[in-house]
Image (spheres, helix red, strand yellow):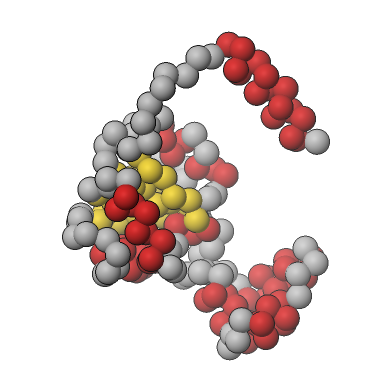
Amino acid sequence: MVIDEILAHNERFVQEKTLPIIGHTPRKRMAVVTCMDCRLVQMFEQALGLERGDVLELRTAGATISKPERQGAANVLGVREVAVIGHTHCGLAHANPIVLTASMQAQGVDPQQLIQDEGLEGTQGLVDWLGAFDDVHVNVREVVNVIRNSPYLPKIPVHGLVIDIETGKLEMVDRG
Ligand SMILES: [Zn+2]
């Protein structure tokens, strides 16, 4: 299993490397919200010039935040600036209800049960509940506004950007 590869690698890692001790307050006093897409692994930090300890990173499916109160944690960690960074070709963009329910069923999840349990309005309600969106730019602006309007955060700049998943190029959508 992959976990065995990981454990073997980790054994070598701790033998070869000694990490400097650093605090948990992000050096750049910034929180970054981005997607959990595997193509962003490593590439994201390299494209932004981020090092260990620089920023607080939140990764969600589609860089979407639906519960603004969770952002309250950013306050505690001394964050003074937030960047929401969606990406092109996101798996949550253009989510088709038919494809989505079929893939859920293939993984042994009953979409109808979920719709019933969560009190959703059919399959389109399910797509919305999962945080799917049509346009990444529109979604980034929405997430930016959710954070800006959060009563749990002090008034700090919140920026919205889109990163090109193929080239790593950033595009400013909404500067805070
Ligand atoms: Zn994504």
Residue depicted at 38% across the width and 36% down the height: 24
Q: Is residue 149 visible?
A: yes
Image location of residue 153, percent across then percent down: 27, 61
Q: Is residue 46 above or below residue 121?
A: above
Outermost residue toward the top? 16
Q: Is residue 171 visible?
A: no
Give the camera-side residue of 25 and 95.
25
Question: Is the C terminus in the top left, top right, bottom left or bottom right quadrant?
Answer: bottom left
The image shows residue 160, relative to residue 6, as above or below, that is below
Identified at 44% across, 57% down, the residue is 63
Nearest to the observer: residue 157 or residue 43: 157
- The x, y position of residue 158, in whole percent, is 25, 56
**x and y percent of residue 8 in the render?**
72, 22
Quarter of the image holding residue 51? top left
The quadrant of the picture occupied by the N terminus is top right
Identify which residue is drawn at 20% across, 55% down: 156
Viewer-proximal residue, 44 or 18? Answer: 18
Residue at image position (66%, 82%) is 117
Q: Is 11 in front, or is 135?
A: 11
Q: Position of residue 173 (x, y in %)?
A: 27, 57
